[in-house]
Image (tube, rainbow, N blue to C red):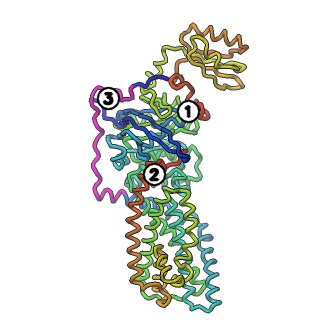
């Protein structure tokens, strides 16, 4: 007998209509299943459909078609039951009413889930201690830094001890140390609380790799792949990933991408005006061809390494571009 | 582009998935406790705000007294009976509730949406009605502190003479006025939730005309019987008229006998509450269908 399913998504699509009357699909025929006890990741760039899926699962949005169940309950027909077993934390969200203190604000949200005040306050104190916010328990929210607010939001997600917790970009914009604390708690919570499940959306590869038992890569509203991080990276074993730092920058990267044996070339800006090139090559034999072509173009190789494939490489291979393209900056330190 | 890998959980294809543990329905008592807790917590924000931000004393007590003063001096200059000073002051005090309903009840879900808090409300199991009742409770506390301050300070400044006909009936009229008014606020809130910015403009447009239509500074009968009856859809119209009759003993300027006005207020309470329930459910469904519960960036 398999473990019970915490999340069961069957061919869910969601269409939006813009103010100009144009329609677009934020999600198309998405299907996935998450078992109880899993820490499952949805990985994709902004606009890929991650948040749309999370909002459908958390009963904030109706699907245009398809079915989804959370903890065994239909998110449309049994939304009341779904709400009793879930919680959600969104990165960068507003924290609450500035006039309340951290402890008061968390108590407020605990009451919306019906927790007895005494138990709620005990849990709040315990969680504030965990995230290192205990000394600010009586500070008004409007006096908190962004990182502190996000820690507080994070605590709010765990107040009702949900069976299924949705974390939507929980470390968005946070510093390295705060991100580390939150990730570490997430891992511990899932491990120590039997039957709990986390569905995490992120566009930080390192975060997904570190946290998730399995993850789905989503792009353009479609789920492209779903497996463990290790298995996803294993799909890259038939190619050689080569990273190099060069100067000056390649004038026509597309031309070199056409070289025989080159499967992919992704240029990126490095430090000090250098350029970072990530190559996907059919085999080791192509390395020489690449180096020779660069020399002919007058490009100096400052650093070269044959790298282990990362989730970023998996994503690039599937989608044909970097995860962070068009997203602003990537969070390599997260 | 690679083909999609299986998206099922590791063992899910081998055997039929077992549904997660069942969840018993909440009993009536459990549901009541959950919603009372939610309402109390939502009210708490406003109760706390009253004590922590005292700037309202300057703006929400001093300013209504100033605007009342203009009418008081006009009535005095025209030689109107002294009870007109009381009429004006009572109307001035009641503006606190109208402002509260308009900007902190009706518009509240819209503000919460703008600030990203709305989704936190809507994914919790507490009923939205409980949250609105909490807002109303907190709003009434907040506004009562303003209205009472205005009434006390104004009575002292203008030397208002009260001729209370019946305290219990006056209190009943006040309670029914607030009940009907805040139910109207709940009804507005679902409309505002759906139509956001447009509704915000509507609130802006409603603020001043209601002062006129409900007779905040004069007996509403002066508008003519049928106009005043039409304006009675706004609970403050009947409420103010009833309270003036009961606190200043002026049946000659009254719109309707107090009994009819109390009945009208009770009726408005029930009708607005039922409409609010229906509208809230309908608007929530519509907002979820059209993706309007959260902003695009959220």
User: A10 or B44: nearer the eye?
Assistant: A10
Name the outermost residue toward the front: A21
Q: CA distance from mark 2 to mark 1?
A: 35 Å
First reached walking from the N terminus: tag 3 or tag 2: 3
Q: Which mark is residue A259?
A: none
Vertical relation: A203 (above or below) A288: below
Looking at the rendering, which quadrant does residue A300 occupy? Answer: top right
Camera-nearest label, 3 or 2:
2
Residue A8 drawn above or below residue B248: above
Give the x, y percent position of residue B209.
57, 72
Question: Magenta: predominant secondary structure element?
Answer: loop
Left or right of B160 on screen, residue A222: left
Question: Where does residue A8 sit, x and y in percent of width and height?
Answer: 36, 36
- Whether residue A274 sits left or right of residue B219 in the image: it is right
Residue located 35% across and 33% down the image: A35
Q: CA distance from mark 3 to mark 2?
A: 34 Å
Q: Looking at the image, is mark 2 or mark 1 nearer the viewer?
A: 2
Badge 2 is on which residue? Answer: B287
Q: Residues within 10 Å of mark 3 (few under 14, many from 20)?
A: some
Q: Kindly state the secondary structure of the residue where label 3 is placed.
A: loop
Which residue corresponds to mark 3?
A: B12
Residue at disc 1, secondary structure: loop
Residue at image coords 61%, 33%: A329
Secondary structure under the numbered disc 2 in the rendered image: helix
Residues shaded magenta: B6-34
Mark 2 belongs to which subunit? Answer: B
Q: Tell me the residue that label 1 is attached to.
A: A334
**x and y percentages locating residue B117 in the rendered image:** 50, 52
Label 3 lies in what chain? B
Question: Pointer 1 indicates a residue of which chain?
Answer: A
């Amino acid at each position: 007998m398999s473990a019970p399913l915490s999340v069961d998504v069957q061919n869910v699509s969601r269409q939006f209509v813009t103010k100009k009357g144009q329609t677009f699909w934020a999600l198309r025929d998405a299907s996935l299943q998450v078992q109880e006890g899993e820490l499952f990741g949805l990985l994709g760039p902004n606009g890929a459909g991650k948040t749309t899926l999370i909002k459908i699962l958390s009963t904030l949005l109706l699907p245009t078609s398809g079915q989804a169940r959370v903890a065994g309950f239909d998110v449309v027909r049994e939304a009341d039951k779904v709400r009793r077993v879930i919680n959600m934390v969104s990165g960068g969200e507003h924290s609450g009413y500035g006039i309340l203190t951290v402890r008061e604000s968390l108590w407020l949200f605990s009451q919306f889930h019906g927790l007895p005040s005494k138990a709620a306050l005990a849990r709040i104190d315990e969680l504030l201690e965990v995230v290192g916010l205990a000394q600010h328990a009586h500070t008004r929210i409007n006096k908190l830094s962004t990182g502190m607010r996000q820690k507080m939001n994070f605590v709010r997600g765990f107040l009702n001890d949900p069976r299924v917790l949705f974390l939507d970009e929980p470390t968005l914009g946070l510093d390295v140390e705060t991100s580390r604390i939150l990730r570490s708690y997430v891992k511990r919570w899932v491990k120590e609380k039997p039957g709990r499940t986390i569905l995490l959306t992120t566009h930080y590869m390192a975060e997904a790799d570190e946290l998730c038992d399995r993850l789905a890569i989503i792009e353009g509203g479609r789920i492209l792949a779903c497996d463990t991080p290790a298995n996803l990276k294993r799909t890259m074993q038939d190619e050689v990933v080569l990273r190099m730092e060069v100067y000056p920058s390649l004038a026509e990267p597309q031309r070199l991408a056409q070289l025989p044996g080159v499967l992919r070339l992704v240029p990126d800006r490095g430090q000090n005006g250098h350029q970072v090139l990530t190559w996907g090559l059919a085999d080791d034999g192509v390395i020489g061809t690449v180096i020779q072509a660069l020399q002919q173009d007058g490009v100096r190789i400052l650093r070269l390494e044959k790298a282990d494939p990362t989730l970023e490489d998996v994503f690039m291979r599937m989608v044909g571009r970097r995860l962070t393209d068009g997203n602003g900056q990537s969070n390599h330190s997260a | 582009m690679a083909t999609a890998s299986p998206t099922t959980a590791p063992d899910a294809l081998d055997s039929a998935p077992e549904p997660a543990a069942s969840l018993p329905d909440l009993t009536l008592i459990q549901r009541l406790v959950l919603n009372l807790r939610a309402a109390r917590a939502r009210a708490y924000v406003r109760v706390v705000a009253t004590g922590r931000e005292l700037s309202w004393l300057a703006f929400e007590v001093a300013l209504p007294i100033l605007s009342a003063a203009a009418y008081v001096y006009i009535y005095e200059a025209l030689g109107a009976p002294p009870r007109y000073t009381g009429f004006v002051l009572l109307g001035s005090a009641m503006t606190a509730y109208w402002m509260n309903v308009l900007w902190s009840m009706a518009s509240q879900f819209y503000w919460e949406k703008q600030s990203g808090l709305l989704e936190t409300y809507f994914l919790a199991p507490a009923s939205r009605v409980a949250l609105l009742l909490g807002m109303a409770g907190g709003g009434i506390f907040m506004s009562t502190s303003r209205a009472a301050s205005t009434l006390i300070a104004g009575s002292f400044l203008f030397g208002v003479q009260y001729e209370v006909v019946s305290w219990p009936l006056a209190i009943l009229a006040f309670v029914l006025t607030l009940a009907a008014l805040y139910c109207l606020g709940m009804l507005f809130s679902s409309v505002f939730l759906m139509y956001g910015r447009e509704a915000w403009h509507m609130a802006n447009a409603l603020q001043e005309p209601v002062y006129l239509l409900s007779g905040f500074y004069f007996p509403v009968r002066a508008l003519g019987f049928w106009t005043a009856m039409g304006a009675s859809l706004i609970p403050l119209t009947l409420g103010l008229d009833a309270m003036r009759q009961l606190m200043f003993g002026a049946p000659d300027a009254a719109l309707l006998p107090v009994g009819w006005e109390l009945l009208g207020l009770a009726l408005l309470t029930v009708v607005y509450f039922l409409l609010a329930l229906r509208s809230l459910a309908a608007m929530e469904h519509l907002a979820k269908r059209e993706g309007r519960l959260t902003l695009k960036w959220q």
